[in-house]
Image (cartoon, rainbow, N blue to C red):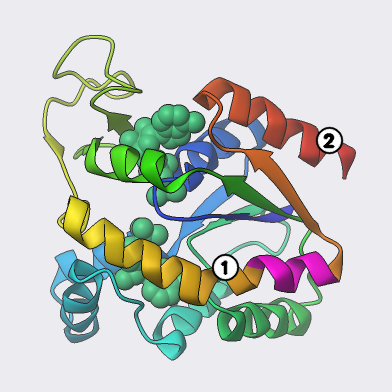
Amino acid sequence: MRIILLGPPGCGKGTQSKRLEVAKGLLQLSTGDMLRAAAEAGSELGLKAKAIMDGGNLVADEVVVAIIGERLDQLDPDQGIVLDGFPRNVAQAEALDNLLKSRGQNLDAVIELKVDDEALVKRVTGRFKCDTCGQGYHDEFEQPQVSGVCDKCGGTSFSRRKDDTAETVLNRLEVYYGETRPVIAYYGEKGILSSVDGMADIDEVTKQINEVLEAN
Ligand code: ADP
Ligand code: AMP
């Protein structure tokens, strides 16, 4: 199964992708995570990307398309995937079509997570993650069961993203509405788009996503 989770920053793509990895054996392909890893590794490409990401703008299409293409090449063709944060504009969506077509593959579903802007700002500014295993948390909505200790791996070091400030998230939302929202219409026209209520609590969103996948 190959699916895309679509929606603005903070709508829950990463949270739900991680759940789909556990529940359905899909592999999360997050271009944001891949770019952050490249930035941390200090490669020229990574450092260039970091400056763009810190401002909340989009990294060049050819860079992200190449990263996704390389990752697909490394995978068993039967490995199910959940794309998180890609495609982010129509040109990337067309490039993805070509990448999949050249491999004789297709998309099974594109799921949009609908969330109000006000809630997005709150979600993004309260987000943090475990440095050891990457498990995501939120100051208010998803705290570790024991404060300061990761539920998943027992790690005790956590961090926040540099682009998760109130100021940067406003630019990221503008970029989303200008560049990424047309991708929803793109998949709508192809007849593979479904929407779920991303304002619901995390378990309810998971349930709605499962219902979409089971109907496919
Ligand atoms: P995205 O990957 O779309 O940017 P995340 O999955 O990282 O978004 O979610 C952003 C923050 O909001 C995280 O801290 C997460 O714990 C929290 N979150 C995710 N889904 C929900 C939800 N349905 N209700 C409340 N908080 C949520
Ligand atoms: P994310 O982790 O999905 O919130 O992405 C963080 C940042 O990485 C974005 O604000 C962009 O700067 C960059 N990025 C991630 N995915 C893409 C993409 N598909 N195209 C362009 N830039 C991206």
What type is the residue that disc 2 sits on? Glu
- Return the residue nearer the eye: 140 or 104: 140
Q: Residue 160 lies in what quarter of the image?
A: top left
List the residue tagged with mark 1: 181
Asked if residue 127 lies left or right of residue 211, the reply is left
Choose mark 2 or mark 1, whichever is in front.
1
Asked if residue 28 lies left or right of residue 152, the reply is right
Q: How far from the left and from the top, in percent, is residue 8?
A: 47, 55
Q: How far from the left and from the top, in percent, is residue 45?
A: 24, 84
Query: Upstream in the sequence, badge 2 or badge 1?
Result: 1
- Return the residue nearer the eye: 208 or 121: 121
Q: Residues within 10 Å of mark 1 (few under 14, many from 20)?
A: some
Identify the residue at horizontal 47%, vertical 41% (top origin). 12
Magenta span of residues: 184-189
Query: At numbered mark 1, what does the secondary structure look like: helix, strand or loop?
Result: helix
Mark sitting on residue 214: 2
Which secondary structure type mostly characterizes the magenta part of the structure? helix
Identify the residue at horizontal 52%, vertical 67% (top origin). 86
Identify the residue at horizontal 17%, vertical 85% (top origin). 44
Residue 186 highlighted magenta (yes or no):
yes
Asked if residue 120 lies left or right of residue 214, the reply is left
Task: Look at the numbered disc 2 and say if its residue's Cβ is closer than 8 Å to ligand 1.
Answer: no
Is 209 drawn above or below residue 179 in the view shown? Answer: above
Mark sitting on residue 88: none
Is 19 drawn above or below residue 114 in the view shown? Answer: above
Residue 128 visible? The answer is no
What type is the residue that disc 1 sits on? Arg
| Residue at the bottom extreme of this rendering | 62
Residue 51 visible? The answer is yes
Is 33 drawn above or below residue 138 in the view shown? Answer: below
Q: How far from the left and from the top, in percent, is residue 97?
A: 71, 79
